[in-house]
Image (cartoon, rainbow, N blue to C red):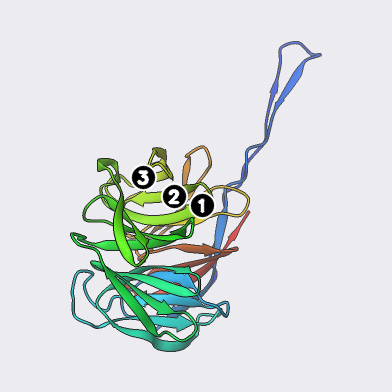
Amino acid sequence: MFRSLVISSSSIVLAACAATVTETVAEPVAVASIEQVWVSEGFESPEGAAEAPNGGYFISNVVGEGRDKDGNGYIAHIGPDGSIIEQHWAAKLDAPKGMAVLDGVLHATDIDSVVSFDIANGKRLGKVRIEGAQFLNDATEWGGSIYVSDSGDAAIYKIVDGAAELWLQDERLAGVNGLLGDGERMLVSTMTTGSLYSVTADGELTEIANGMENADGIGLVPGGGYLVSSWPGQIHYVGEDGAVTTLFDEPVSQNDLTVIGDAVIVPNWRQNTVTMWKVRR
C-alpha cells in the first residue's frame, strides 16, 4: 500500500498602503513529503541500515533486547527492492545497531564495541572495545574517521587507528542517538530532549530543533532540510529554520532512518520489517 503525505508551502505577498509600492516576500522552501514504496518482512528486531555496494542495504538485527550479550545478533543484506539476498551476511554479534561504511569496511556498533567487516564478503576484520561505553547506538563516517554515539553516557567516540577515544561528552547530549557527518559539521539527535544539533569539529553544539520524542535517525533532504525519525512511530521534516512538521505518525517503530539519494530506509524494530520511502518536494 502506498502512502503519500504532503504539506506544501504558499507564497506571501505584502502590499504597502501606497498603491505604487508593493513588497513581495520570497516564497518559503516547500516542506518535503514521503511516499511509501515497499515494506520488507523477515527480520528480527531490525535497528540500523547502511548502503551496500550493489545498491542494496545492510540491516542490523538485534534479535532480542538491546543490551543482551547473547551472540544472536546479525547483519542482513537486502536488495534495492527489499528482497533478502543473505539473511546472515554477518553473524554472531550481540545487539548490532548503527552502521557506517569507510574505505570498503562496514563498522557496526555492538553494545560496548565496534565490529568491522569487509563489505565485499562479510568477513570479520576486527573489533574495537570501548572501555566504559554503556549503550553504543549509531555510527557515521565523518572526515575520514568513524564516530559512534553512546546513548547511556551522553558521549560520542571517535575510532582512530583501531582504537577509540572520547571525542565529545556534554550534558546536552543526554540520550544521544543519531549521528550523521555532513561536510564541516556533524548532525546529532538526542532522545532525552528530542533535539537535532549541529556540531563543529571543535565540539561546539548548536540546536536546530527540539521536541521530537526519542529522536533517532537523521537524513539530509535533497533541496534542504532534514528527516528525523522518532522510534515510537514518527517521521519528521525539520526545516532549515528549525520548524518541525510530522510527516508520519502511527504505532510503527521508526528506528535508524537513513537517506540515500531520495530513498529513505527505516527499520521497524517491533514489527520486524524494513520500510522504504521516497522523499519528494
Q: Which residue is mark 2?
A: 187
Q: Which residue is mark 3?
A: 195
Residue 126 quadrant: bottom left
Sequence-first disc among 2 and 1: 1
Q: Which residue is mark 1?
A: 182
Q: Is residue 200 visible?
A: yes
Instruction: Say what secondary structure mark 3 lies in.
Output: loop
Q: Is residue 28 above or below residue 65?
A: above
Sequence-first disc among 3 and 1: 1
Q: Is residue 126 above or below residue 7?
A: below
Measuring 77% from the left and 15% from the top, which residue is drawn there? 21
Measuring 19% from the left and 80% from the top, which residue is drawn there? 70
Q: Is residue 26 left or right of residue 102?
A: right
How crowded pointer 2 is (Cα within 10 Å; few <14, some 14-19, many 20+) is rated as many
Toward the right, the furthest residue is 20
Measuring 55% from the left and 70% from the top, which residue is drawn there? 2
Q: Residue 221: image x %, image y %? A: 56, 54
Between 70 and 44, the one nearer to me in the picture: 70
Instruction: Say what secondary structure mark 1 lies in.
Output: strand
